[in-house]
Each structure stands twice: as structure tokens, then as C-alpha cells.
Amino acid sequence: MFKTKNTPKIYAYTDTRFPGYIKVGYTTKDTAEQRVRQQMENVKLPKQSWEIILEEIAIREDGSFFTDGAVHRQLQKMGIINKKEEGEWFQCTLNEVKAAILAEKRQEFNKEKRSLDFGMRPEQQEAVTKTAKYFRSFEKEKGIIPHFLWNAKMRFGKTFASYQLALEMGWTKILVLTFKPAVLSAWREDLLSHIDFKNWQFVSKKEEDISEDEINHNQPFVYFASLQDVLGRDKKSGGIKISNEWVHNTDWDCVIFDEYHFGAWQDNTKDLFDAKKNKEEKEEYEQTLKEQKEIETENDGKALDFQFEEDELPITTKHYLYLSGTPFRAIANGEFIEEQIFNWTYTDEQKAKTEWNEKNGANPYASLPRLVMLTYQLPEDIRNIALKGEFNEFDLNEFFSTTDTGKNATFKYEEEVQNWLEFVRGQYKEKNEDALKDPKNKAPMPFKDVRLKDALQHSFWFLPNVASCFAMANLLKKATNKFFHDYEVVVCAGTQAGIGVEALKPLEAAMTREPLKTKTITLSCGKLTTGVSVKPWTGIFILRNTQSPETYFQTVFRVQTPWVLKNPDKNSPNREEIIKHECYVFDFAPNRALSQIVSYSNRLNVDSNESPEKKVADLLSFLPVLSYDGSVMKEINASELLDIATSGTTGTLLARRWESALLVNVDNITLQRLLNNEEAMKALMSIEGFRSLNQDIESIVNKSEEIKQTKKEAAEKDEELSKTEKKELTDKEKEVKSMRKQIQEKLIKFATRLPVFMYLSELREHTLKDVIQYIEPELFKKVTGLSIEDFSLLESLGVFNGELMNDAVFKFKRYEDSSLEYTGINKHSEDAYIGGYDTVTQNRVIGAVE
């Protein structure tokens, strides 16, 4: 008796009989497919010639219905031609149809043909809210430009969320500086396609975008540029490039640094390293910088060889926003404290995926596959030819080294590399008796185990250099490797492979338009590791040394790109079939791989309330790690992983960790925070050696501002400084640097007292929070000279790098635990406390006294 009206829908479809045209119709049937099949009843076709490409509810924002005629009128307003004899057929694109529907829903003319109207996901809204609140807290602070970091994993939607932040803050002039110009298309598309950013202008030096001369200054705009270009100098005059003068003369609302991890290598604290005290840190920094430059040179044809400090940029802005999915060094160096960081890591993403409530609609994270890591210790007779270093560790770069270059390259240890190929196929005759006794213990090999082999139709092999890529391609072609002849091997390395998306074309051709029916292996030493997405990649083989966690995870996350088949039957445009539910990382340097996992979980999770073991456990719940030790493969838990990652730590190395320049922050923002906090200044000046701190900090801040202003004025005038002016500027910079280093050394001296306190206290501290909150306040003040409250305040202001200290506290604890257990004392055992007598503490006190 009470029949409900079916929901009205607008649908669109294409037909091979009418190339270049789209039919836009209306129906109240359950699906568009029912209506289209009804239309085709009298047309006898040998096979289906149509594909339904859109099906959308026809309801305006005010709740009223509309029909296809309204959409036709919107399309005609846009100047789109329709077939006169067939009025519902339009010569247009799918996005133009979506723009017309959006215009009708909002009852406004969509002259810019914007086709997107989705809202922010919960994490994007959280990022915008937290950042806006932080920026607004500085509105009354004179002389301080706030800096904020989005530690946001790939596919977070950083460009869209950045533009939403601009709307929230009321910005109208945004400068986007990137270390990777290849990301331009994402910034352009999000701004010009979404209805929320109506009237915004996208400016760049590309021909398809508007130029500086065409900007309408009565409307908001974004200028996208590479940092290399903006900071570049004119070859003839040595001054700012004429084309960039307007950038330096504009008062920007915000400067956004995109792909910031690439710039973070130009570490402005590296000159503070003490060559003797921090030899290991210096060597690690130099190795990672070298590796990063090698990758960049291979990927873009040139490395980032410039340095800069944001506060000394000849650019005026009110805010700085930094975007990166792997800002390991930026966080480790204390560039940002917890309140300046929004986190969205792999763990956050996968947790959101599992906890999504279907009542809120389709799960937006469903297509993001879970990572699984498998590490393999190679048989001794394969790996023993490439052992290096103090601990005789297996060296992948040496193992895959070559005797020639170019297309004629061959492996130096070709027999062993051939054995490795047999190993990953499960064909290598292992000499390990334990593995042969129990077949159940045999490790799943990538190209033998049916579950893995079926998933690895398309894989990425990350090799040390161009020559090793060609050597591997040559080896795979040999008759002995007939198994791999089913795979199209694509060498994506060297200058001949092209740059950016150009390097992608041969791979796309090899995969064809139906990648489910083809097989490929991509060999690369840097290309396609950033800025591109290859959906069919399901596995990555790490076949090179990777000291840098930035490089490691930027590359690893390439294989986590969702692979979704949309409209699989060509009749259901809103239906998606997820092809890739899991993806795999295969690493043949187990200790290195597990250390990278610890780095990711601890260094990117800045929550000081969580212990490192808890952080690692959280990551492993979404990224299981299976490790093959030569006999059996088993899943690694958090405690085991941390034990492996921290193995080889010595008391000497721990001591040096507490002498690191990275433990304290003496940049201008931190020093200004100190000046603005009377309580914090009073606490520091109570320590011997800090009596003139107030005066010293004021001098550093003021002179730094003078230096910045001098450079800016010279840039604006496009004039070179005279010799006298240059000398005065250099002398002033040296003076500031010297004063800054003096304060730094005094703070480091204080930091070295913390392990002494931990050694003497009775509790086993897991985190810096334990040190601050749960210990003996009188002993703390006696050893360090500060009250717990004062130290906590200074840490919250960023004077001390809480994240690095957290790491040092935890490593101290694990080292101490292992030392005590070695001597027969278990910290968790009741036997450690005999009749109220604490043997553990007594031993430690005696040791300290000695």
C-alpha cells in the first residue's frame, strides 16, 4: 500500500560504435545496467559494445531530485557539443560529466569544470586541526615563525590536506617548494579539480599553468617551484634569477616544503659533530648522504648538492609546513618536537583499516595492502665470498659487484649469484642437515612457495648500481635460468632509461594493458623509487646495502601501492575488486633489515609515553616479520627483534650516544622559546656555567636576525656584497656559531649526567618519561643539578631532544639487563632482593664508586 519511489540516478556510458562520445541518461531502476540493457534489447550486437562509466544519485544539496535534462543543460553551458540527432550523446570526458552533475547538485555554474567534491578523512581533519591550532598559538608571538611537520606516509593525501589547511587558516598566497619537481601534477590536480578550491590559481613555470604575469592578485594562488630553482643564482650576475625576483619580494602566507626528507640530508648541524667523540655518527651520516646522492643522481640525473637554513632563506613568510613520509633525520636531529609533528605512519594506516566501522560507509583504507617482510640468511657457501667489516657481515654490494660496465656487465661472483637465483627458487641443495630432516621447517622461498610465486607476477629488484642491473639481466637470459624466461625483464637503470615518468614507459609496455596476464621483473638501482606508482608490483627484493632508512622505506613502500580493478564487468562503475591484499619485502641482510624496522617504529613514532618495545610490537602486528636463520623460518616478536637490532652495542658506544650534539637543540626557535619562558631560563641559569645565558641567547637571536636581514636585502637588490660587507657578515656568522656551540656544549655536559643517575637509581627505566616521572627526585637533582620538574619543562620546550634521549635510555636499559643476566642476576627475579637487600642496586653502586 505504501510503495517507495526508487532512488533516481544519473548514469553515463560509452559505446565503441560512437567513439569520443558519452551517453548521459536517467533512471529510477535499481541499477544503471538494467536501464542500459533495456535500451539495447532491439539492437543485435555480437558482443557487448558499451561500458557504463558512471552511476550517481540524482539529488541536489537541497534534497530535490533532478533528471538527465538538467545535466545536459549544464554540459551545454560548458560549451560541450552534443550529437543533434542523438540529444543524449555528448562529445566530452567523464570528468566533464562529473563537473556538470556537481554543478547541478550545488545549483551553480561550474565554469572551471571541477569534478571532485569528496571530504577529508578523519586523519586529514586531525592534521589540519592540530596544525592550525599550533600556528594560531604564535599569532601574538613577535619574531617567531612557526614550523610544523607532517610525518605522513604515502597516500595520506598531503596535497589535498595542505590546501584544506590553507582554507582553514584563510591563506591566499602559498609557496610550495619541493625537492622532487616530479610531484607537480599531484599539486596541480588537487587544486584545480576539487570544488572546495574554487577560484584558486595554480602557478608554475610549466607551459600548461599560468605564469607570474597572469596571476589575478584578487584571488588566492599557489606557486609551485623546485627549491633548486628558487635558490639558484644567475650565472652572469651571481644574483637572484630575474624570473624569481617576485618570489623573493612576495610576503607569503606559508612556505610548504614537500618531500622534505630529501632536503633533510643537507643537515645544518653536521658541522657540530666532534670528529673524535662522534666518529660513528659522522661515518653513518657520511655514508647515508653518499647513498642518498647516488640514488638521486640515478633517479633525476643530478644530486641535491646545496645547503640552506629556512631562517636564512631570502623569502618572507608567516608559516612553514614540512611534508615527508620518512623524516627520520629531521626528527632525530630535533628539528621538530612532539607538539610540532602530526604523525600518520604505516601502523596508523593499517590500524585504521582494521578498525573502520562499516556503518560509516565503504572502508577508505581497504585497498591498502598489508606488508610482510621475509629475511633470509644465505647458506654459508653462498655468502662467504662477500663478508666485510668488523663483524664479518654479509655485504650485498660486494656480492652483486661486477667486472664490467654497461650492457656487457657480468657479476664478479657469477657462480655464487647463480646459486642465489637457485636459492630464491628453492632449488639450491642446502647443506644444512636440520632443514633436511624436517620438511615442515623449510622456509617459503619467493619463487617456489605457491602462495608467494603466484603473488610475484610483477616484482622490483633493487640492486647496487647500473652495471649490476645489466649483469642480472644478462644472467637471467641464460639457458640455465629457463624458469625466469617467462618474465619480461626490464632494466630501468642508467641515462638511457630516462628520468621520472619516462623511465616508466618500457615497464608499462612490458606489463601491457592487462598486467594480470603478464609477468615482469624490474631491475633498478634508483629509478622508480620515488614519485611514481606501479600498481602491479607486489614484491621487492632488497639486493643492495641501504644505510639510509629514508631510502629503504621510500623504496619498500613502492610495492604497497593499491591495485584495484574498477568496474570489472564494465556494468558496475562503483564496484571495485581489490587485486592486491598483501605485498612482500625480501631482504637478504637480516640484521640490517630488522634494524630498519626498529628505526621506522621508534624514530617516526614520537610518542614519548610509549616504550620502544611497545612501538615495535604495534608495528609488527601489522607488518609481520618472518626470519630464516639458515635452518628454520619463524616469526620474530618485538623483544627478539630489538635484541637483534641492538646486538653489538658496547658500553663505549652507549657513552658516546650521551655525548652527541643531536641530544640538544640550540636553533633560533628553541632559544626564543627559552627567552619567552621565565621559569625555564631561571632553571638553566641556576646551573654553573649558565649565569650569562639570557644575554648570550639574546645576542644569538638578534645577530642571526641581522644576518638574515642583510642577506635578504642583498637578494632583493640583486647586488653582491662588497668585500668589507662580506667579511663583516662572515665574522658575525662565526661569532654566532661560536656562541651557539658554547651553549650546546654546556647542555651536552648536563646530558651526560643522566646515565650516571640511571646507573645509581633503583628502577629500570624504559623511556625518558620513566626518568622524569617515576624516580628519586632528590638523587636526580643531586646528580644533574636540576629538579625533575625543571628538566621536564626544558624537554617540553625542545631544549633536549626527547626522542633521541628516549632511544638512548632504552638502549642503556637493554645493555644493562644483558650485563646483569650475564653475571647471573635477573632484574625480574625475586632473588635479586634478599631480605630487603637490593643486590642489583648494590652491585651498581659499587660499580659506580669504583
Image (cartoon, rainbow, N blue to C red):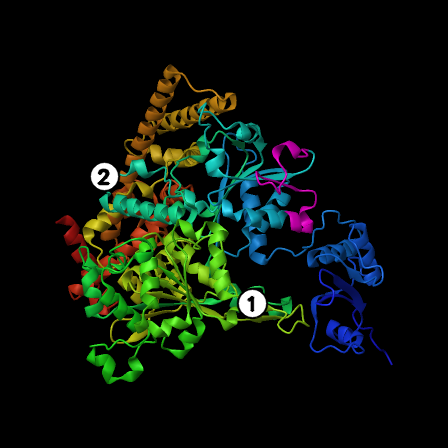
For label 2, the SS is loop
Image quadrant where one finds the N terminus:
bottom right
Residue 66 appears in the figure:
no
Q: Nearer the viewer, residue 760 or 308?
A: 308
Which of the two discs, 1 and 2, labels the residue nearer the N terminus?
Answer: 2
Horizontal side of 740 relative to 79 (left or right) equals left
Place of residue 228 in the rendered image (x, y in percent of width and height, measured from the top left): 46, 37
> What mark, if any, has residue 275 been given in the picture?
2
Q: Amino acid at mark 2?
A: Ala
Place of residue 436 in the rendered image (x, y in percent of width and height, measured from the top left): 24, 82
Place of residue 331 in the rendered image (x, y in percent of width and height, measured from the top left): 40, 47
In this figure, which residue is indicated by the disc labeled 1? 564
Q: Which quadrant of the structure image shows residue 474? A: bottom left
Residue 215 shown in magenta: yes
Q: Amino acid at mark 1?
A: Val
Q: Are marks 1 and 2 in contact (CB under 8 Å)?
A: no
Q: Which residues are magenta?
A: 192-217
Q: Nearer the viewer, residue 730 or 40?
A: 40
Place of residue 473 in the rendered image (x, y in percent of width and height, measured from the top left): 35, 63
Q: Nearer the viewer, residue 651 or 154?
A: 154
Q: Which quadrant of the structure image shows residue 660? A: top left
**Which residue occupies 72% across, 50% down?**
113
Horizontal side of 679 relative to 375 (left or right) equals right
